[in-house]
Amino acid sequence: MNDNEPKRENKNFIEQAIEADLKEGRFQNVNTRFPPEPNGYLHIGHAKSICLNFGLAKSHGGKCNLRFDDTNPVKEDNEYVEAIKQDIKWLGFDWDALHYASDYFDQLYLWAEKLIASGDAYVCDLSAEEMREYRGTLTEPGKNSPFRDRTPEENLELFRGMKAGDFPDGAKSLRAKIDMSSPNMNMRDPVMYRILRANHHRTGDTWCIYPTYDWTHGQSDSIENISFSICTLEFENHRPLYNWFCEKLNIHHPRQMEFAKLKLSSLLVGKRFMLRLVKEGYVNGWDDPRMPTLSGYRRRGYTPESIRNFCADVGVAKFNSTIDIIRLENSVREHLNKIAPRRMVVLNPVRLTITNWPEGQVEYTEAINNPERPEDGRRNVPFSGTLLIDRDDFKEEAPRKFFRLKKGGAVRLRAGYIIDCHDVVKDADGNITEILCTYDPETRSGSDTSGRKVKGTIHWVSEEHAEKVEVRLYDRLFTTENPGSSEDGKSYIDCLNPESLSTVTGYAEPEIRNHAVGEQVQYERIGYFVVDQDTTDEKIVMNRIVPLRDTWGKMEAKGTTN
């Protein structure tokens, strides 16, 4: 991983438990794993688990595996496998070994036969609906399946028949024989195998029975000699089952520990929710910059450093809570402020003519690339008598504290001159089409000898030299803090933000042409942007990453968001 990760003084509860286990000699190594199911793209919540598992292994000199939990062939695909690999590497990590749960299908089957032989598993003929009925409730115990007392010999014959394809899908299942009256629902004879004729992305049609996650998870950890199985809190109630299987099989027994998921305000990260957004065209694919997927954040222009820093900042907790998404946005602002070069771009242009500028003359002014990084030097920006400025930077009649350009007022052009506005040109409808100014030749930035002081500085581009840019102004995908909650009766589709994407034509200084796809820049006084993959030799496309400041917080304070 990266040596420049933020250093923390206090250890979280998982680190404390690991160090206690090492000290007591329970484990000799800190071996972890990240086990995603390849049924969708990774989202921002996965980043926390990735950082935690890979980070723990690295900090203790151990190993971290990537293991795909590919036990449900109906929903899994190689597309997701490759996307997950790419996301992990982009985030700054690499695995010590690559495994698939399907690597262990043969061993899992043999272990299942072992539990059948010891009387700890049986073949059940109940349908899924009947099984739910027999399972009981949180307040009422379940009741034993009528097939629970089959002999090991009968169960073994039936299980081998399941594997051979002698029974239709759903006709039988293999269940662990534990305790139907257990207060933990997961211990009420959980299913280990189900019959499912589906083509697997790696094993093809070799198998017509597939193991469940609960049966696969702990045994896969054991095979890989994992010492610490770090899971999110919803698996806390599964831990007794994890332990039960390892103990019954008498195999290497990792320690499972749970931590709180990363939940961010105004985001919805469930794969089935995201899949609907993709399939029904509410977004333009898994990597749409509005999506909370890692591929979406990458295309949006977020840096892996900013996401890792954010995960370190929120830390590891024992209890679920919601983190304000502003913290993630501030993390990328903080990082981009340090690394992103500054460029002048006008998004809502109006022409500004310098009436005393020598006709046809072009100068080149020197502008600082990044004040946070003096070593990045300066760039030359063409300056002419016809410029474009942002329409919001001019008012014909302005209040006293308006420090940008107004009629009869003066302002400094960034890295240029002080100009004085003396008139405007309007069309037949009264709209301003041109601003007329004079410049003071003694006020050139870097060599100002005039002694003049003005309170405002605005950005600009030379109209003659401007590069057209398609600028995609991405915003939050949902308008509410908790989209799809039952509180207001709205579905998450009802909460979609109709203004989550707008597109404008921007006019940029020529240097914008020299940035490659994926490079981030700061549009001076506007925000951070990245060159999108749709850019061609003929057209530059850039995505807004975040504005310079938190505009949503201000809007909410004024009551202008839902």
Image (tube, rainbow, N blue to C red):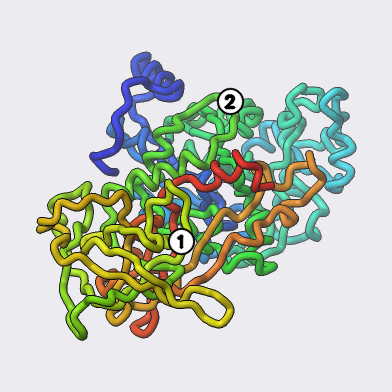
Ranked by sequence position, the earlier of labels 1 and 2 is 2
Q: Secondary structure at mark 2?
A: loop
Residue 395 numbered mark, or none: 1
Decide: few, some or many residues near mark 1? Use Cα within 10 Å; few <14, some 14-19, many ≥20.
Answer: some
Residue 107: image location, x then y, percent: 54, 46
Q: Secondary structure at mark 1?
A: strand
Residue 101 higher or lower than 409, as above or below: above
The answer, for residue 196, to whether it is visible in the render is yes
- The image quadrant where one finds the N terminus is top left
Residue 304: image location, x then y, percent: 37, 50
Decide: few, some or many residues near mark 2? Use Cα within 10 Å; few <14, some 14-19, many ≥20.
Answer: few
Q: Are marks 1 and 2 in contact (CB under 8 Å)?
A: no
- The residue most toward the top is 24
232 sits left or right of 506 in the view: right
Residue 319 numbered mark, or none: 2
- Viewer-proximal residue among 547 and 184: 547
For image coordinates 52% across by 60% down, the residue present is 474
Residue 386 higher or lower than 480, as above or below: below
| Amino acid type for the residue under numbered disc 1 | Lys
Find residue 489 and report its image quarter. top right
For image coordinates 50% across by 61% down, the residue present is 289
Residue 452: image location, x then y, percent: 19, 52
Residue 430: image location, x then y, percent: 55, 75
| Amino acid type for the residue under numbered disc 2 | Phe
- Viewer-proximal residue among 344 and 204: 344
> Distance from label 1 to label 2 (Cα)?
52 Å
For image coordinates 41% across by 33% down, the residue present is 313
For image coordinates 22% across by 53% down, the residue present is 370
- Of discs 1 and 2, which sits in the foreground? 1
Residue 512 higher or lower than 116, as above or below: below
The answer, for residue 109, to whether it is visible in the render is no
